[in-house]
Amino acid sequence: MSSAGGLVGREAELALAAAAVRDLSEGRASVLVIEGEAGIGKTRLVECVVDAARSRGLAVYGGQAHPFERTRPFGVVAAALGLSRRSPDPRRAAIGELLGGRGSGEPALAAGDIQYRVVEEIVDLVESTYSESPMLLVAEDIHWADNASLLTILSVARQLPLAALLVVVTARSSPQPAQVERLLADLAAGGARTLRLQPLSSDEVAELARDVLEGSPGPALTAMLAKASGNPLWAVAIVRSLADEGLLRRTGDIIDVTTSELPASLGDLVVRRLRDLPPATLELLQVTAVLGDAVSLRDVAAVTGRAPAQVVGQLSPAFDAQLLDEADERIVFRHQLVHDAIYQHVPSPVRRLLHREAAVVLMAGGADRLEVADHLILGAERGDEQAVAWLRDAAREASGRAPSVTLELMRRAEALLPGGHREADLVSAELVQALLRAGKVAEASDRAQTVLARHHATDVDTPLRVALVSALALQNRTAELVAVVQASLAGSIRLQPSDQVLMLAQQSWALTYTGDPRAGEVSAGEGLAIAEQASDPAMTVWALTALMVAVGRQGRFGEALTHARRAALLAADSPDTRSLPLQPKFFLGLALFDCDLVGEARAAYRAALDDEFGAGWWLSETLMADAQASFAIGEWDDAVPGLIAGGQAAQEKGNPLLVSQSLAYRAIIATAVGDHRAANELTAGIATSLDGDQLSYNAGVLAFAVAGLRAAEGDHQAAYDLLLRCWRFDAARESRFYHRCLAPDLVRLGLALGHRDIAAEVAGAVAEGVALAPEVPTVQSLALRCQGMVDGEVEPMLQAVSLARQAPLLVEHAGACEDAARLLAQGGRRDESAALLTEALERYEQAGADAWAGRVRGRLRALGVRRGSRGSRQRPVAGWESLTTTEQAVSRLVAEGLTNGAVARRLYISPHTVNTHLRHVFTKLGVSNRVGLAAVVHHAVE
């Protein structure tokens, strides 16, 4: 890679960039971040990377963010990939339709759905593109990019780390918006290489001047160039300006200046050059600067009311002065700093007026509101009611595509309203909704409470109360939520039935998940009665789902399943399933799983994925639930990638409870296989959540994971104390949901540590649960098992094993076998004990739980039975036969040319999970790209 075209002093950076392009040509992925101050040479370095990629025949896609396009969702990514409904490529045109708020004639999606769907579609498009040829994707100036573009860049980098893809982003070093800082930190954490371009040395600046002047700078010119502080753009501008103004003299090979005057900055230099432009050119140049740093000739002509030919003619002096250039039918400023200098030179009142007029003219010409929203934001002044209306309309258009853009537009609309405006309350209510969609729940609740606490318009009271309840629920502020709901239901303003049901359902969930499932059941029941009386299917689904959760937490699993089945049937009969506020198939899966119907549960999860794969709602929860099902039945080769992927998806969606569950289940597996180092690392992320007076609603599984590790390390007292604390916490709240996690180990440890009274108390509580769910085999098994351990009686233990065999659950089945075997051995029934230990061993070996299997082998040896290891541990460590069944399925589909997204849809997993499987596959097969994988698959099939 050469430094042609004036790029000097960047040998190390060029070498690293060249290595990235070589890796790309060989099918290896990487991410390159180029940071530096304006004018330092980021774009020139990118141009070298692009030239090198094209010289190797690689596909190149690039886009640049612009300062007046921050309200255009997916702007830089859409520009880079040509995402437009007018694209000749059907896939790009379809994504363009989504970006325009339309999607194949489908009904409007809920807020946030389209953004998630567009991101997944873009990731899939990128994957399809590089499958045909290694691909370079460039996004320049991301410090001006919209949040949706930043999310897409991160998703592409995260989901396609095994791709023939090089992602290059550039950004100014500081200051950076917080969201850009987060993106760069996430990219670095994923292995991105960062090039921070430093100022050129004095020798490098002299070399740059020689390239421009074809001669060596003299002492005075050298001293003058030092004022550029190593910024190559400023240095070159100094040289060219002095040459254009005839202020240089040559003596042999030495070129020096005839003046000591120098503008203090590049901006001052640009302004000085404006003085030589004709008035018509200057006026037109200023309008162009207000429109942006890269604008279409047609837009300039429309805003100025001039013919395109006249525009070109009048701007010619600006081109001659090297202030403007042309690129892809657009007028572009030679550099952003040039644009900034001209833009700032326009008086502020004139700028505002031009922005305002530009917005009017562009929208009259058919431009999208979102494409000109920045002009409205920059041009409107307080009291501009027309601008407020436009911004509110633009916010509604953006609500599904980019919630953060909606929020910015609504903030500006509110700021423009004059004091005491008749629609101030309505705008406030719309802003609260925008805050909720953008995830600013604390601010949303504060704003809603502020408006409700003062005199406000009657028609916004209910929407604000409903929004407030949602915001409080997301913050787990149960007491305040209940107070708002009760005050709303008893208030003078009559709520619609749908609003009543929604509030009662939110109250139910809040009460249930903070430890009062009985009160949650009452609230959900009230909501159900209202929904049924109003014959509202969607609200009935809300109420039934809340009721299902409340009774399920109390251990009434069969009753919960009845509610879940009814909700699913109602949803199936709904003419418009997208109008339903929940994913009832997902909740049906949860209820089925709690009743030991694991196969049916996974079928329900897959049906939910068929409905929701293109949307963000409940996707991460559904994928995580399915991964947990894989864990439960002992399919750990599939569970681990699913749990990792589910945790990543939960992290991206800001769901810390799901993240902690992912860590917990992976820690259990790490403990079971004997990797205590990994288990300790995983539990470090969840142990602190088990401290304090309040525990999270998923504390039972977290405690099971941490206590299991402590016991495996020999600290039985710590394990017992933790389990007992969680048990007491749940018992005080009449929650039985985690009995199957907590009770067996707590009884066993209690007896071993001399706490027989506690063991008996736990066994008694578990026995009471049988009456609540008599149809669930593991609930009955659990009661018999715990009581059998307390009483030391074998027969109940054998019945427990028999019942556990009716469910496919590994821990419950194998644990029952071990506990029964222990009593059998104590009673001298060694053969029966060995048979049950062998039964447990086979389950552990199939799962790959080496440590647990080793424990059982030790007990078998004590009985005089010796068994070697077998099962999954005998799988080869490399080659095609080393792959799991799912890994082989993924490999075959990838070899057929399917993208990660297509494979995910075919196998009912997530693209994250596919990527995790591929990482393992590449390592086991010793291949570095999909071409190598396809060759191995072809050979294996042959």
Image: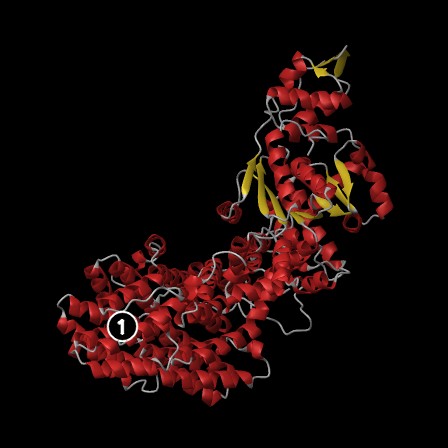
Residue 466 picture quarter = bottom left
Camera-side residue: 691 or 32?
Answer: 32
Q: Position of residue 167 (x, y in %)?
A: 61, 47
Residue 127 picture quarter = bottom right
Q: Residues within 10 Å of mark 1 (few under 14, many from 20)?
A: many
Q: Where is residue 442 in the image (x, y as percent from the top left)?
A: 42, 60
Q: How is the image coloured?
A: secondary structure
Q: Which amino acid does label 1 sit on?
A: Glu
Above or below, 365 against 570 in this view is above
Which quadrant does the N terminus fall into? top right
Identify the residue at image location x=53%, y=63%. 887
Residue 260 in view: no
Number of marks drawn: 1
Q: In this view, does 16 lie to the left or right of 308?
A: left
Q: Where is residue 415 in the image (x, y as percent from the top left)?
A: 54, 55
Above or below, 456 against 529 in this view is above
Camera-side residue: 628 or 516?
Answer: 628
- In the picture as drawn, the residue positioned furthest to the top comes out as 251
Q: Name the residue under label 1.
A: 818
> Which SS class for mark 1?
helix
